[in-house]
């Protein structure tokens, strides 16, 4: 799963966590009350059973009522449909069956115990607290007050009935009234405490969601950074590493996931020594370069910077060292790219300014040629001027080509058909050129302007055929292959020795040419056109059928389906 997909889910955590957290908290409280009911019911059943066994005239109805209450309480706890069907809304309305299965049953049973027990009834007044608290915590405040009112009415009514039957008017009615006031106080206080806890819980869930969102965003930013990030402890153990850092530390592929030791590979010795020096010095030094010497890959020079992460900033734990790694070759390439971009903008401005004077020179030379029609020497001079004017005009056109803005939605084209058509036209133009092709038969769509792709392929074929002339049997090979679902690879090969290092270094720079009359813009234009459409062009020297070859590879981006 991509890192972008993880951040998107984290951004929705606040919305997703609140209802889930509220429901789980409600279920936990509801289960706790059900467990308390079961414990109370079993205690009542046990006490009545002991009375039944010890008494000569046992209260059979009270025992039966307690056993039924115990069965109902156990059923509400153990039957998932009853337990999970309860909600805050269902317990807040007296007409709902969930209310009658919990609070209503408790009030009815406790009141019946008072009536059946008479003067010898158990101290049920304290038991009314359970349904009152249950309604006040799990339901709305009015439901808690309703339960308190019903408990008060049940206690007063049973007390009046007992006193009426026995004819003994004692202080029980007053005690029942005071107990009723206590029920209302318990309902109000419990409801207020429950509401406050719910608000704090929602705030905590919101803070948790925001923290997870921020963590996901931070992780996404670190993962997408082009700069490598390593978190190292005092034992030189890497506790965290982003993909860029693992790519820089890898020889042929990315290094393993953290944690790992900087002494795990010999190639990392310079980096491990730099980290150890940082721990020993404890100061913030200037950036330094370290070289990773791989056995199966070229040495890699890294620009190293670090920052301290102190324990007080981490809210506990040990100090950590944050290493920031950059590939020095990429830094130089980026600086060179910025320089070339500035040069390209300047060249486009100059080309625009000289286009009109160049047209005037061309027209004046044509008029001069008409006046010198009979002068052989004058004709040679005007022909030379016309040839150089055309050359300058071609350079101006090439430079101005790069100044044209690109559409935000590039056109789609069939790469197979487009490259095959270019190859046919080029071979007809060259005549004796030997061109070997390897093109697939399927339709492969790419995002590229057809005329721009034609310009790239023509430049590469011309360049390949020109450098192939030094071979005993000159030839050019054109290939198009599918790399994966997102990329195609177009290669142009020709027999030639590898380019010297000083030539390869400036291969794609403008106005750099090994020919005296070359403009030095061909490969530069190819690279700029490729980058416009998300493609890239690379040079490589390799063997083909036992012969040294120069290979230019254009990696094309396959077109995505459009509505």
Image (tube, rainbow, N blue to C red):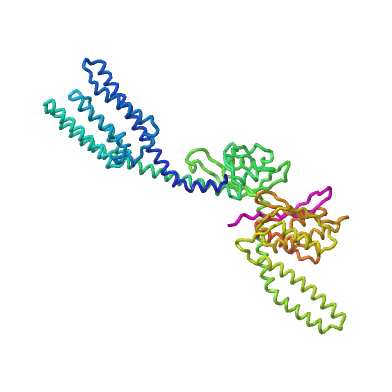
Q: Is residue 536 visible to the viewer in this orientation of the structure?
A: yes
* Left or right: residue 399 compared with residue 140: right
The image shows residue 105 at horizontal and vertical percentages of: 28, 32
Say whether residue 244 is magenta.
Answer: no
Q: Is residue 5 above or below residue 117?
A: below
* Left or right: residue 219 compared with residue 180: right
Q: What's the magenta region? A: 537-563
Residue drawn at x 18%, y 25% is 118
The image shows residue 170 at horizontal and vertical percentages of: 12, 28
Residue drawn at x 69%, y 49% is 483
Task: Say which of 463 and 445 sits in front.
Answer: 445
Q: Residue furthest bottom?
A: 371
If the image is split into quadrants, where does the N terminus sit? top right
Q: Is residue 35 above or below residue 370?
A: above
Figure label count: 0
Q: Is residue 500 visible to the viewer in this orientation of the structure?
A: no
* Left or right: residue 447 compared with residue 220: right
The dominant secondary structure in magenta is strand
Where on the picture, by quarter, is residue 96? top left
The image shows residue 16 at horizontal and vertical percentages of: 45, 45
If the image is split into quadrants, where does the C terminus sit? bottom right
Q: Is residue 505 above or below residue 170?
A: below
The image shows residue 484 at horizontal and vertical percentages of: 67, 48
Say whether residue 543 is magenta.
Answer: yes
* Left or right: residue 22 compared with residue 259: left
Q: Is residue 545 above or below residue 454?
A: above
Task: Say which of 276 and 227 sits in front.
Answer: 227
């Amino acid at each position: 799963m991509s890192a972008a997909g993880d951040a998107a889910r984290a951004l929705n955590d606040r919305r997703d966590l609140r209802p889930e957290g509220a429901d789980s908290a409600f279920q936990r409280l509801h289960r706790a009350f059900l467990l308390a009911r079961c414990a109370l019911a079993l205690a009542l059943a046990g006490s009545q059973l002991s009375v039944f066994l010890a008494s000569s005239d046992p209260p059979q109805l009270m025992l039966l009522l307690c056993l039924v209450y115990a069965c109902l309480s156990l059923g509400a706890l153990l039957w998932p449909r009853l337990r999970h069907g309860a909600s805050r809304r269902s317990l807040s309305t007296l007409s709902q069956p969930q209310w009658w299965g919990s609070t209503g049953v408790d009030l009815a049973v406790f009141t019946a115990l008072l009536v059946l027990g008479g003067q010898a009834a158990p101290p049920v007044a304290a038991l009314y607290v359970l349904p009152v608290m249950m309604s006040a915590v799990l339901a709305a405040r009015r439901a808690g007050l309703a339960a308190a009112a019903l408990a008060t009415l049940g206690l007063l009514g049973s007390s009046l009935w007992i006193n009426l039957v026995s004819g003994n008017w004692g202080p029980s009615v007053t005690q029942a009234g005071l107990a009723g006031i206590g029920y209302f106080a318990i309902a109000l206080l419990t409801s207020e405490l429950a509401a406050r806890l719910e608000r704090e819980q929602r705030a905590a869930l919101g803070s948790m969601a925001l923290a997870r969102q921020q963590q996901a965003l931070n992780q996404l930013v670190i993962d997408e950074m082009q700069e490598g990030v390593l978190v190292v402890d005092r034992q030189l153990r890497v506790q965290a590493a982003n993909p860029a850092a693992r790519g820089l530390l890898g020889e042929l592929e990315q290094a393993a996931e953290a944690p790992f030791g900087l002494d795990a590979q010999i190639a990392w010795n310079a980096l491990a020594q730099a980290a150890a020096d940082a721990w020993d010095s404890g100061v913030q030094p200037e950036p330094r370069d370290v070289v990773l010497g791989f056995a199966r890959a070229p040495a890699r020079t890294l620009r190293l910077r670090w920052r301290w992460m102190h324990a007080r900033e981490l809210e506990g734990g040990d100090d950590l060292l944050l290493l920031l790694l950059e590939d020095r070759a990429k830094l130089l390439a980026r600086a060179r790219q910025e320089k070339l971009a500035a040069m390209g903008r300047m060249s486009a401005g100059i080309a625009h300014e000289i286009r009109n004077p160049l047209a005037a020179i061309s027209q004046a030379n044509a008029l001069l040629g008409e006046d010198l029609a009979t002068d052989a020497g004058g004709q040679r001079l005007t022909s030379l001027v016309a040839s150089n004017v055309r050359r300058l005009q071609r350079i101006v056109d090439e430079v101005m080509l790069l100044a044209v803005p690109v559409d935000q939605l590039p056109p789609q084209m069939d790469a197979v058909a487009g490259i095959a058509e270019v190859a046919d036209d080029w071979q007809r133009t060259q005549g004796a050129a030997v061109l070997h092709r390897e093109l697939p038969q399927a339709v492969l769509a790419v995002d590229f302007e057809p005329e721009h792709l034609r310009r790239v392929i023509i430049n590469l074929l011309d360049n390949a055929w020109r450098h192939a002339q030094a071979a005993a049997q000159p030839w050019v090979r054109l290939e198009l292959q599918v790399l994966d679902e997102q990329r195609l690879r177009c290669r142009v090969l020709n027999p030639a020795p590898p380019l010297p290092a000083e030539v390869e270094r400036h291969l794609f720079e403008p106005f750099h040419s090994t020919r005296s009359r070359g403009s030095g813009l061909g490969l530069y234009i190819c690279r700029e056109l490729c980058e416009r459409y998300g493609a890239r062009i690379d040079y490589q020297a390799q063997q083909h059928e036992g012969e040294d070859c120069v290979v230019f590879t254009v990696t094309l981006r396959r077109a995505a389906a459009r509505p």
